Amino acid sequence: MVTLAINNRRPAAVEIPGNFVAAGRFHLPGHKEPLSQGLRTAVAATRPLKQPSYREAIRRLSENIPPSIVDRSFRLLLSPERAAVTSSHFAIRHPLALAGDPVHAIDPITVLPLGAPVSVLMITYQGNSRAVFVTDPVLPGADKLHQIWLSEATDLPSPATHY
């Protein structure tokens, strides 16, 4: 089980700063396969979430849910008895600059939401992807998750073929 941030930004809002996301919980395939194959199947399973028709449906649903229900849902999603990995991926498609100086790389930073055992954030910028893992220290071996991911991800085809 994984909780994903689903991009529901309208095409016309591409240049507006901020997050336009909805959260969704998914059972991803691949949990009994080697990680490299599991990553491939996860990419394929979540591909529909990037299609305009799905994003528009999610956006409309999100806009019409009362804030009190959204708040309660997040509290339930992040409770220890429903603990799930949280995951986000941001692809930054335009070159960035700070005070006129070009940005060459972005290092992601994230937090571990209350009740979540693992949080993963990946940012893709200028053909490079960087990921950060935050884990609950009570989980045995979780501190090695980033090393396992790096080892398996190294065997995958170029990230450009996935995004």
Image (cartoon, rainbow, N blue to C red):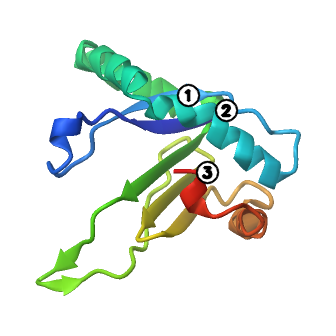
Residue 100 image point, x, y percent = 12, 84
Q: Are marks 3 and 2 in contact (CB under 8 Å)?
A: no
| Residue 83 visible here | no
Residue 118's disc is 3
The three-letter code of the residue at mark 3 reads Val
Residue 93 image point, x, y percent = 33, 60
Write down the residue under mark 2. Answer: 1
Residue at 59 percent of width and 61 percent of height: 159
Q: CA distance from mark 2 to mark 1?
A: 7 Å
Residue at 58 percent of width and 34 percent of height: 46
Q: Are marks 3 and 1 in contact (CB under 8 Å)?
A: no
The three-letter code of the residue at mark 2 reads Met
Q: Nearer the viewer, mark 3 or mark 1?
A: 1
N-terminal-most mark, 3 or 1:
1
Q: Dot 1 lies on which element? A: strand
Q: Quadrant for residue 96, please give it.
A: bottom left
Left or right of 160, for residue 53: left
Left or right of 15, for residue 108: right
| Quadrant housing the N terminus | top right
Left or right of 116, for residue 100: left
Residue at 80 percent of width and 61 percent of height: 141
Write down the residue under mark 1. Answer: 25
Count neighbours of disc 2 (C-alpha within 10 A) and say few if under 14, some if 14 to 19, many if 20 or more: some
Q: Are marks 2 and 1 in contact (CB under 8 Å)?
A: yes
The three-letter code of the residue at mark 1 reads Arg
Q: Dot 3 lies on which element? A: strand
